Image (cartoon, rainbow, N blue to C red):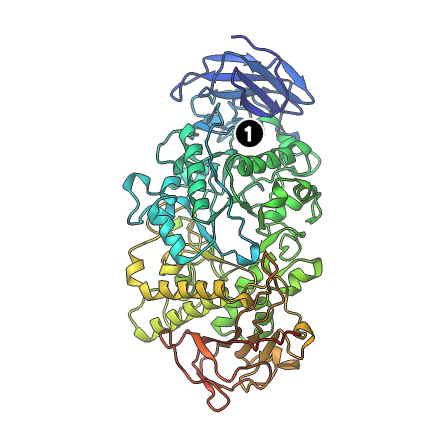
Amino acid sequence: MRVWAGRPYPLGATWDGAGVNFALFSENATKVELCLFDSGDSLSESIRIELPEQTDQVWHGYFPELRPGQLYGYRVYGPYDPAHGMRFNSNKLLLDPYAKAIGRDLYWHDSVFGYEVGSRNEDLSFDSRDSAPYAPLALVVEEAYTWGDDRSPRTPWHNTIIYELHVKGFTQLMPGVPDKLRGTYAGLASAAAIDHLKKLGVTAVELMPIHHHVDEHGLHLRGKSNYWGYNTLAYFAPSVRFSSVRHPLFAAHEFKSMVRTLHASGIEVILDVVYNHTAEGNQLGPTLSLRGIDNTAYYRLMGDNGRYYMDFSGCGNTLNMRHPRVLQLVMDSLRYWVTEMHVDGFRFDLASALARELYDVDKLGAFFDIIHQDPVLSRVKLIAEPWDVGPGGYQVGNFPTGWTEWNGKYRDCMRRFWRGDGGTIGETATRLTGSSDLYAHSGRRPYASVNFITCHDGFTLHDLVSYEHKHNEANGEDNRDGANDNHSSGYGAEGETTDPAINRVRMRQMRNLMGTLLLSQGVPMIYSGDEIGQTQRGNNNAYCHDNSLSWVDWSLLEKEKDWFEFVRKLIKIRKSQPALRRRRFFSGQGIRGENVKDVYWLSSEGHEISGDYWNHDSVRCFGMLMAGDVEEFDEVGNAIRGDNLLVLFNAGTTPVSFQYPVAGPAGPSMDLMIDTARPHAVHVAFDAVHPYPLEDRSLALFRWKPATPEIS
């Protein structure tokens, strides 16, 4: 086979219409061989060819006779000295980090480990067996897709409502989705799925990981799989698991069609991405790709020798974001998903791990600097999960401008407040208004806070109000996994019950929590299934359950129709009221110089709250009055004006007669929009003569039109 020198850029396998260029970075390798396979059933390569050139530590070659559809892998030569971080082993076939399609998945076998499994010397031993029959194979692709007039909805952050979902779990049991499309990208793009999303009213879907991942060896031995997918092996390849046609060349096409269909329906696509670690694990993990290509360059290693890995992810390793070629890998991957796959943004799993320049978290790390100056990535939605498992890793509020964050403090505060914990109303007020204590100091806006009550990691909303303790026995880890402190309660029973009184309280608490979420400043995120009362039977870490425990049970939609309509109503209210979607923090000052503030905080006596009242341990009730005359303008310069809104909160266990507001611009009469204790009530008197009967554990929302300002 002919081979020419080729080019060192772009990295990966690139078809140019006449042949294929291969380029692989390895700083410490002494030789790199390209291995070509005839089929996925091949036990060994049909041909092995040394890449002829090395330029700036990139090994490359051009093959004029190769075409898209070619299966390949690499063998990389270099020193094997695990005690000092060098883990080259040419007996191990390695996956191209830039592979855009996976032609054959990993088959677990002891030969995919670089050391002798079971040896008393553990990873310091050497395994000489050929891993080619079992290793994953990359596939050369041709980038060809007709996008037509596809355009991103580009929904402004302050108008965004995120819906987190798992591609398979969302549609696997969904009626109306054709059987062959259930659990797939095409299923998510089906009419039934789109109709549900549009009917609910969300503006963006946040997809749990769809990059190609592998199941951990330990899960494989237990007969389980990594359903969630936070174990990435290939950062450019969409997972074939979610393709209706189980062929790697079709997976990317189907993914693109899904994105185009969602865009046409006004729904953005955000990817949950895992760049903090890879599927190769710690020193006892397999040698599948980066470890064998150049372990010391790609991973953060400990100490002077480098045998062990720094682990800020809890998954065995951490990518070395201090290395320019590792940064390039991540940035190239991100740009690929935006430019080639048309996604609208990313949620970065354990993002604090990406910010660690040396050991401590550095919010001005190279990772952020590069993204901020990038003309492609700086324009998409960027969401950080602002923590990792390392020291100092909890960094909520400390990410730079241009980023939003999953606000874990919002989640914990709202759970504690509605559970009835004392001393929480002060923080609750701060979280309701966009968490200015976390974001205002750096010049960010309320929408820097992605507010959520539940997500994939933890209890569902139904389980949050039904279980005081986690029940993860089905995971096979003796219930040791998953968070122990969930700020949850069963309100008189643990798990399902037929007691009508307990079930009434639970349903009211679900309304309270969802109502608070959608009436708060910031960006609300709803976890899929919560809108119909999905349960995981108390499991708060269902990462390994690719079954009915995790799949959304759409039979609940009819059973919980009233609950679903309540959530829809809340979303409609949010979209219709500018006061709930502010682009600036409340100032507490007058509007347009008038003697009317933009927000008032009220005691149940109707007076403005001040001083120690905020921190009083016995207080569970307060009101929030928001001016609808927001200092905002639409795209053509028209002033945005909505209703004045009053929200009453009572997390206590006794009813309260809430007095008509003495402070603030209350109207002569107020329309009741929501009462979580009376979900069907519409006309209840609330004026200076009639206090509002606010039930225990309830939330009520009122509106009235602000006075029209005189035009001079």
x, y (%) of residue 496?
A: 32, 65
Closer to us: 660 or 400: 660
- The quadrant holding residue 247 is top left
Q: Is residue 333 left or right of residue 191?
A: right
Is residue 218 in sight in this rendering?
A: yes
x, y (%) of residue 59?
A: 62, 19
- Residue at 42 percent of width and 47 percent of height: 166
- Residue type for callout 1: Pro
x, y (%) of residue 533?
A: 36, 61
Closer to us: 150 or 9: 150
Is residue 282 in sight in this rendering?
A: no
Q: Looking at this view, name the residue that lies furthest to the front.
A: 712
Of helix, strand and loop, which one carries label 1? loop
Instruction: Rate crowding at label 1 as few (under 14), some (14 to 19) or many (20 or more) other CA atoms within 10 Å.
Output: many
- Vertical position of residue 258 compared to residue 140: above or below: below
Q: Which residue is mark 1?
A: 97
x, y (%) of residue 638?
A: 59, 62
Closer to us: 472 or 662: 662
- Vertical position of residue 590 compared to residue 196: above or below: below
- Vertical position of residue 62 compared to residue 431: above or below: above
- The quadrant holding residue 449 is bottom right
Q: Is residue 298 left or right of residue 108?
A: right
Image quarter hosting the C terminus: bottom right
- The quadrant holding residue 579 is bottom right
Q: Looking at this view, name the residue that lies furthest to the bottom.
A: 689
- Vertical position of residue 291 compared to residue 183: above or below: above
Q: Is residue 597 left or right of residue 338?
A: right
